[in-house]
Amino acid sequence: MKEQRDFNGRPSYEFEDIRVGRYARISSNIARRFKLQPEGKFVDTPEEKLQEYSCGNVLVSLEWATASGYSVNSRGPEADQITTDIAEYIHKKYRV
């Protein structure tokens, strides 16, 4: 698990060892566990998968990219804590 900050100082976590084939299952598990609903369009290209999720005023993105693997990103200050919670959940459950 690699912790970073985006250009706005929001937390972002990368899991380089998670392959693209696990994106849908992991994202579905996270959405269910954290009561998140999909927002907007799902981006699905050979190089990238991206879906934003919300719960109230909290917005996070669950992504996969060839360069970074699976990632969890906060989309605003109200999502910082849940972003960290999701990253810790992934780290413990999937041992990455």
Image (spheres, helix red, strand yellow):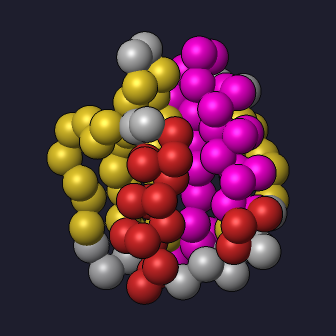
Q: Quadrant location of the N terminus?
A: bottom right
Residue 74 lies in quadrant? top right
The answer to whether 41 is drawn above or below residue 68 in the figure is above
Residue at 43 percent of width and 48 percent of height? 31
Which residue occupies the foreground of this view, 22 or 20?
Answer: 22
Residue 2 visible in the displayed image: yes
Q: Is residue 4 left or right of residue 16?
A: right
Is residue 77 a member of the stretch shown in magenta? yes
- The residue lying furthest to the left in this view is 41
Residue at 23 percent of width and 54 percent of height? 42
The percent position of residue 45, horizontal first and vertical second, equals 27, 73
Residue at 54 percent of width and 83 percent of height? 19
Residue 69 lies in quadrant? bottom right
Q: Point out the stretch of residues depicted in magenta.
A: 66-91
Instruction: Report how many numbered discs are placed on residues in the image.
Output: 0
The percent position of residue 70, horizontal first and vertical second, equals 57, 66
Is residue 84 a member of the stretch shown in magenta? yes
Q: Is residue 17 left or right of residue 4?
A: left
Q: Quadrant location of the C terminus?
A: bottom right
Residue 17 lies in quadrant? bottom right
Q: Is residue 46 left or right of residue 36?
A: left
Residue 67 visible in the displayed image: no
Q: Is residue 78 left or right of residue 5?
A: left
Which residue occupies the foreground of this view, 48 or 94?
Answer: 94
The percent position of residue 24, horizontal first and vertical second, equals 37, 70
